[in-house]
Image (spheres, helix red, strand yellow):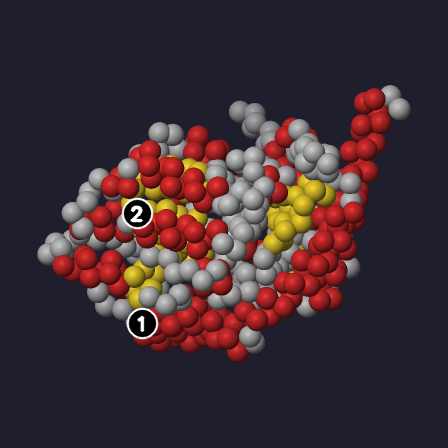
């Protein structure tokens, strides 16, 4: 019987080699990894065609603000990998803390009662550094799980209060609160909402404080915070007795690094308090110094009823999420007389080794004064990025601390955007990646930056200079295409 010929393995083009530093893999080994990646691994937020046609970098080493891939190419981590590697790569203090804990105790089932020393210590530490008044802690494995927990916490709380109709949530347009089912619907990103239709009931969305492109057609400060007052109008329409919570990122991340006016969050706090609505701050990205304060809500002078965070708590070394909430919520559960009113948790809640990583990470942040550093270096980053405003396709530059965005436009005067099908922001992102700088497309037309808090001024200069070249090349390419199309 004649054997059927094997289909040859798909060859993924490899990125050009740069200077190696002793970390490059053998070419055959690197090629095999790229083929296996294309054949098996699904990258959730990478365009499917891009992964299949060009492939993505596969990293083998990280040190400080730099990463190296299988070909030995060096990248500056301009996004702290995924908004999370606050203390930089290769911190042996965290590695040692995790190894030491695993030698003593690798796991304890906090979910069903017994716990571990680092779990208790980290919960206590978080209460000390969180906005005053947040005294209770639930551990999860990340931001999405934390927001799922928050949804259940809010609804269980109002049931315990004898107000079971308060099931609705209000969040912002383009808000991102995770990609698990409930968290995705809670956010205001249309593609997620469409994927999850019909989703959870009672999810409402409102205008965000996007001053460059006000969704209400107004101008700050003459607008008198009309976007915040949208919450008042929703309350009037829906009824305060149906709304359980309002949630927002103090600075929107995935939605385009939208920094609200300084009086926006306090206005939201006042409205929530007046209408007996829980205020939730999603600080998954903004927590642990990113904006120049330990938590962005603290920097804005606000204490939410519930604070959701993750990422920077371990600098991404191990997965951990946190939900902090006020004592009143906990005491309401106790007073309800129902032992199972909040019956919830995860297998890896308060994992000992993960909590040990969190403790070591927070020690670094405090010892090296990285919150203050983010504030100071953030001013320099914003100043250097502002120099990009002279480029023809840069409409706005904004940020807070070491978190920023460059907004790309077709026409600076009218703020008109390029047609979505051109994917201009993605071209800039890919061009910068090819040049050795990791950024992110945020929204449809923004390049987001979020480097590790340890970044130096020289490294900021390197990052901005490379991004400028990427923007210039894409602008030149677009100009050439326009000339060809117009026959000039």
- Distance (Cα) linking label 1 and label 2: 35 Å
* Residue at numbered disc 2: 275
Circle count: 2
Q: Position of residue 18 (x, y in %)?
A: 77, 55
Q: Position of residue 189 (x, y in %)?
A: 48, 37
Q: In front: 187, or 170?
A: 170
The residue shown at (50%, 75%) is 366
Q: Is residue 348 visible?
A: no
Q: In front: 224, or 421?
A: 224
Q: Is residue 393 visible?
A: yes
The residue shown at (81%, 33%) is 479
The label on residue 263 is none
Q: Residues within 10 Å of mark 1 (few under 14, many from 20)?
A: some
Q: Residues within 10 Å of mark 2 (few under 14, many from 20)?
A: some
The residue shown at (55%, 61%) is 291
Q: Position of residue 362 (x, y in %)?
A: 47, 71
Q: Which of the two discs, 1 and 2, sits closer to the camera?
A: 2
Q: Position of residue 460 (x, y in %)?
A: 70, 62
Q: In front: 115, or 456?
A: 456
Q: Quadrant of residue 67?
A: bottom right
Q: Quadrant of residue 445?
A: top right
Q: Quadrant of residue 141?
A: bottom left
Element on which disc 1 rests: helix
The label on residue 120 is 1
The residue shown at (16%, 60%) is 334
The answer to whether mark 1 and mark 2 are in CB contact below 8 A is no
Badge 1 or badge 2: first in the primary sequence: 1
Element on which disc 2 rests: loop
């Amino acid at each position: 019987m004649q054997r059927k010929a094997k289909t040859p393995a798909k060859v993924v083009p490899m990125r050009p080699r740069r200077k190696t530093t002793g970390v490059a893999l053998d070419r055959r080994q690197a090629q095999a990894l790229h083929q296996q990646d294309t054949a098996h691994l699904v990258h959730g937020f990478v365009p499917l065609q891009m992964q299949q046609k060009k492939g993505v970098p596969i990293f083998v080493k990280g040190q400080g603000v730099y990463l190296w891939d299988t070909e030995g190419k060096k990248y500056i981590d301009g996004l702290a990998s995924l908004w999370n590697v606050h203390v930089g790569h290769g911190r042996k203090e965290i590695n040692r803390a995790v190894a030491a804990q695993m030698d003593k105790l690798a796991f304890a089932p906090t979910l069903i009662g017994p716990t571990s020393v680092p779990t208790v210590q980290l919960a206590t530490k978080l209460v000390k550094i969180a906005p005053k008044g947040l005294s209770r802690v639930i551990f999860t494995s990340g931001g999405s799980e934390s927001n799922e927990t928050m949804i259940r916490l809010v609804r269980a709380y109002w049931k315990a209060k004898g107000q079971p109709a308060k099931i609705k949530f209000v969040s912002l347009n383009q808000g991102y609160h995770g990609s698990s089912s409930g968290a995705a619907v809670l956010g205001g990103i249309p593609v997620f909402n469409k994927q999850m239709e019909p989703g959870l009931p009672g999810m409402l969305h409102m205008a965000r404080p996007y001053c460059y492109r006000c969704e209400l057609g107004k101008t700050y400060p003459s607008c008198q915070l009309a976007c915040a007052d949208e919450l008042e109008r929703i309350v009037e329409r829906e009824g305060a007795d149906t709304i359980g919570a309002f949630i927002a990122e103090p600075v929107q991340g995935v939605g385009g690094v939208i920094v609200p006016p300084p009086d926006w969050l306090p206005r939201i706090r006042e409205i929530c308090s007046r209408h007996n609505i829980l205020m939730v701050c999603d600080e998954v990205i903004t927590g642990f110094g990113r904006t120049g304060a330990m938590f962005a809500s603290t920097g804005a002078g606000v204490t939410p009823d519930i604070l959701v965070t993750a990422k920077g708590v371990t600098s991404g070394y191990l997965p951990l999420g946190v939900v902090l909430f006020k004592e009143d919520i906990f005491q309401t559960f106790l007073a309800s007389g129902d032992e199972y009113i909040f019956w919830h948790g995860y297998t890896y809640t308060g994992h000992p080794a993960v909590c040990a990583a969190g403790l070591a990470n927070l020690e670094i942040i405090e010892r090296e004064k990285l919150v203050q550093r983010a504030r100071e270096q953030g001013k320099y980053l914003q100043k250097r990025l502002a120099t990009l405003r002279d480029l023809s396709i840069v409409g706005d530059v904004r940020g807070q601390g070491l978190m920023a965005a460059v907004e790309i436009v077709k026409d600076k005067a009218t703020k008109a955007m390029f047609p979505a099908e051109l994917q201009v922001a993605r071209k800039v992102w890919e061009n910068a990646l090819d040049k050795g700088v990791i950024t992110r497309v945020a929204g449809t037309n923004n390049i987001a930056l979020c480097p590790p808090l340890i970044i130096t001024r020289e490294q900021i200069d390197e990052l901005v200079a490379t991004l400028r070249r990427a923007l210039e090349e894409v602008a030149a390419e677009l100009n050439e295409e326009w000339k060809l199309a117009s026959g000039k």
